[in-house]
Amino acid sequence: MRSGRILYKVAVALGGGLVAAVAMAEPAEVAVVRPTRGDIVRYVALPGSLRANRQVTVQARVAGFVKSIAVDRGDRVKAGQALAEIEVPELVAERAKQAAEVNVAELDARRLVEARGKAPDLVTPSTVDAAKGRLEVARAELEKTDTLLRYANLSAPFDGIVTARFVDPGAFVPAGVVGGASAVVTLADTAIVRAVVPVPETEAVFVKPGLPVRVMVEGLTNVIPGTVSRHAGAIDEASRTLAVEADLANPSDRLRPGMYATVRIGVERHEGVMLVPTEAVLVERSGASVFVVDGGKVKKTVVKAGFVDGMTTEVLSGIAEGATLVSPAKTAPIDGTTVKVRDGK
């Protein structure tokens, strides 16, 4: 019996010590934030790709052998710069023949005009007119050949970079054959690239030029801002999407046509709404909630969330304008815990 009383006294002493220790423990310190009023945009994230602002495959307009090619893949060229020269000896010979025909037609027309001036009764007006007509036809044929000869010298239509080269010197190229047989080089203007994204039909109704755009590209860590530049104006019936484009400046040439991109388009905007940091909102299967500090204690409160813009979340209802919220919500103490407030951001 005596030993039992001793154990009881020890237990009481230890229990009293634990109570004292708990009483002496200080409340948990938490960082808090408060709601603000502002504007928020709802973004939709969609896969897209980058394309050159302008791209063209320069093709041979006259058939012949490639005499020389001045550029290769990766070369930067200026508008008007020589790209390649096609050797067309048949056209050169044809031009010489036509030039001679022009000279003969000029002599005939001049002689008939002079003859009619001296003997109008012997040379009829129709004869003079026919000679002038033959001269005009000969000149037109010569001009046509000169035009084709100019096509033998291929030049860049705009500033850009050569992305593909299809022929080497000595190769024969036909004239303007469909299917790429007459292709010489492909030129792309990458000073501006187009982020092209198919927007689903459900979101297409909100899209218009000027909406904010954020583009993220594989391999680059920064987010590229922009705006919607244009859209197709009609839904593609096969994919049920609207083709949307955003022009992006590319001064450092880090954006390359063909790159995969994640494009976020701000399709809707709410103004003057209650906003809280996204980290102050706990999202669970049952819904969204925040931890409100009221009377020195934490109270888990269910809220109705609206738009979420990365770092910021719109709160439609559930908390007052001047509420004090624990942030981040994931590390908040359990409901009912006494806390000490430390202002966060």
Image (spheres, rainbow, N blue to C red):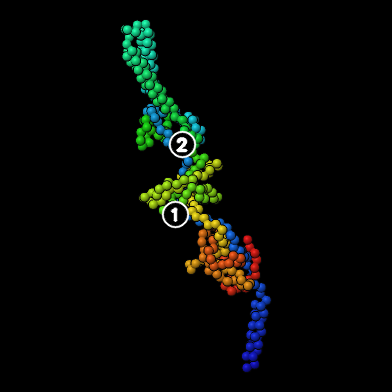
Residue 9 vs 267, above or below: the answer is below
Q: Residue at x 37, y 28 (%)?
A: 63
Q: What's under tag 1, amino acid-wise?
A: Glu
Q: Amino acid at mark 2?
A: Leu
> Could you say which is closer to the camera, residue 161 or residue 299?
299
Q: x, y percentage for residue 240? A: 39, 52
Identity of the residue furthest to the front in this view: 121
For the point 32% across and 14% down, the residue is: 126
Q: Position of residue 192 (x, y in %)?
A: 51, 41
Identity of the residue drawn at 59% across and 63% down: 35
Q: Contact (CB < 8 A) between labels 2 and 1?
A: no
Q: Is residue 105 above or below residue 21?
A: above
Q: Is residue 87 visible?
A: no
Q: Position of residue 300 (x, y in %)?
A: 56, 70
Secondary structure of the residue carrying numbered label 2: strand
Residue labelled with disc 1: 203
Q: Looking at the image, which residue is at 39% across and 49% down?
A: 235
Dot 1: element: helix
Residue 187 badge = 2
Residue 90 visible in the shown view: yes
Q: Is residue 79 left or right of residue 112?
A: right
Measuring from the top left, give residue 321's x and y in whole percent. 59, 65
Q: Quadrant of the C terminus?
A: bottom right
Instruction: Give whichever of 43, 268 is nearer the camera.
Output: 268
As drawn, the residue found furthest toward the bottom would be 1
Question: Could you tell which of marks 2 and 1 lies nearer the N-terminus?
Answer: 2
Q: CA distance from mark 2 to mark 1?
A: 35 Å
